[in-house]
Image (spheres, grey):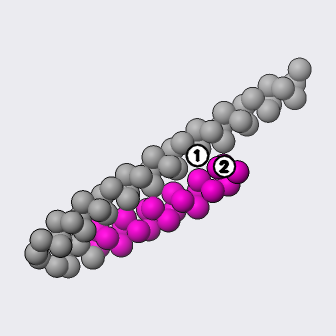
Amino acid sequence: MLDTIAPFLAFLFLVVGAVLLYDGLSTSDLMQTAKMIGGATFISLGFVTLWFGVKNWWKSRTLYKEARNE
């Protein structure tokens, strides 16, 4: 189930992070710093989620292929 949710969550985190970064650039106050940190955090979380999703997909694909050949 996590293999089907991981791409959606990664996309969601990346979009939210991009929106926060874009919105943080347009203001110049204390909220700008908070939006920039939040946006960078969501972007990082999106990339990590995407990486683990691809890694797990690749591992399951390889194991399935090996089990099929035996």
Picture quarter containing residue 41?
bottom left
Q: Residue at x 51, y 44 (%)?
A: 51
Is 11 in front, or is 41?
A: 41
Residue that badge 1 annotates? 53
Q: Percent x, y for residue 21?
A: 29, 68
Amino acid type at circle 1 is: Gly
Marks 2 and 1 in Cβ contact (< 8 Å): yes
Specify the quadrant that holds the C terminus: top right
Q: Residue at x 41, y 52 (%)?
A: 45
On screen, residue 6 versus residue 43, left or right, reads right
Residue that badge 2 annotates? 3
Looking at marks 2 and 1 on the same chain, the residue that comes earlier in the sequence is marked by: 2
On screen, residue 49 versus residue 41, left or right, reads right
On screen, residue 50 versus residue 57, left or right, reads left
Q: CA distance from mark 2 to mark 1?
A: 6 Å
Query: Is residue 3 on the magenta stretch?
Result: yes
Q: Which residues are magenta?
A: 1-22
Q: Percent x, y for residue 42?
A: 38, 59
Q: Percent x, y for residue 56?
A: 62, 39
Picture quarter containing residue 64?
top right
Q: Percent x, y for residue 30?
A: 12, 71
Amino acid type at circle 2 is: Asp
Circle 1: is it few (<14), some (14-19), or many (20+) Cα within 10 Å?
many
Is 34 in front, or is 60?
A: 34
